[in-house]
Amino acid sequence: MKTLYAVAGALLLACSLAASAEVQSSCVGTLDAPLLPRADLTIHARPAGLEIVGTDKEVLHVTCKTDDPERAQQVHLEFSGGSGSGTLRIEGPPTHHGDLQIRVEVPRRTNLRVDMGAGEVKVEDVAGDKEISLYAGQITISSAHDWDYQRVDASVDIGEVNAAAYHVDKGGFFRSFTRKTDQGEYRLYAHVMTGQIDLVGKAEPAE
C-alpha cells in the first residue's frame, strides 16, 4: 500500500511540474513554451515595439529584432506558468531610438492582458478577451476574420480613438468609445494615456 501511495504521489508531482514551468532566454535567442488554445496570457513588457500574432500552433513563440546585438543580450525574456495560463515578462535596459521589436506568436484563440509603459502594441488575428494598457504610444488591434466582441471599451486621456469597425473617429482630451452587443463572444478593453488606439476589423453596416 505504501508503494501505491508513493507511486501516486510521484505521478501527482510529475503532473504538477508539467503543468507549471519557467522558461528563460535573452533577445539574442528565442523563447518557446507550450500554450493551449483559449489560454490566459499576461504580458508585462519594457518599452518596445510589441507585435502579438495568432497562429494555428499550440505554442508561445517569442523572437526579437534589434539593431544593437549587445543590448539584445541584456533584454531578458521569461515565461512562467503552464499551458493553460501563464505570464511573459520582457525586461531590460532602454534601447536607442526604440529599435527593439518583439514578436509574440500565440494560438489563434488566446485571452490577452498586456501592460507596457510606452511603445507600440499590435495585435493581429487573435480571438479572445483583451485588456491592453499603455502609458504612451499606440495600440492597434486588427482581424481578418469576424470582429466578435460583446463589449468594447477604448479610451485615451490625450490622443485619438479610431474604430473603423464601428465607424468611430474621435480625437482630443479624454476621448472614449464603448459598444455592447448580445451577439459577440469576447471583451476588449484598451487604454492609452497619451497616444492613439486603432481598432481595425470587419465593419458594421453604417447606420
Image (cartoon, rainbow, N blue to C red):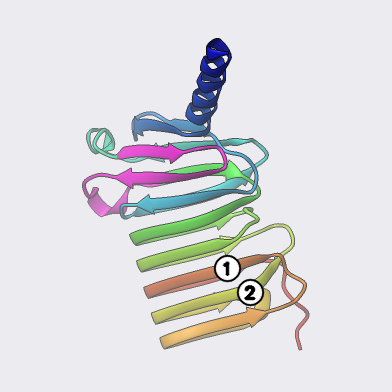
Identify the element where label 2 is drawn. Answer: strand
Are the residues at dot 2 and dot 1 in contact (C-beta closer than 8 Å)?
yes
The N terminus, quarter of image: top right
Of the numbered discs 2 and 1, the one sitting upstream in the chain is: 2
Question: Vertical placement of 124 versus 192: above or below?
Answer: above
Q: Residue at x 46, y 85 (%)?
A: 175
Label 2 sits on residue? 151
Toward the viewer: 94 or 11? 11
Residue 96 place in picture, x, y as percent = 23, 50
Find the magenta span and give its range.
Answer: 76-101
Residue 77 place in picture, x, y as percent = 35, 38
Identify the element where label 1 is drawn. Answer: strand
Q: Residue at x 61, y 61 (%)?
A: 142
Q: Residue at x 57, y 68 (%)?
A: 188
The quadrant holding residue 195 is bottom left
Q: CA distance from mark 2 to mark 1?
A: 6 Å
Q: Residue furthest front?
A: 1
Q: Residue at x 28, y 36 (%)?
A: 72
Label 1 sits on residue? 188
Q: Residues within 10 Å of mark 2 (few under 14, many from 20)?
A: some
The quadrant holding residue 196 is bottom left
Is residue 96 in the magenta section?
yes
What amino acid does circle 1 point to? Answer: Leu
Q: Which mark is residue 118?
A: none
Residue 22 place in picture, x, y as percent = 40, 32
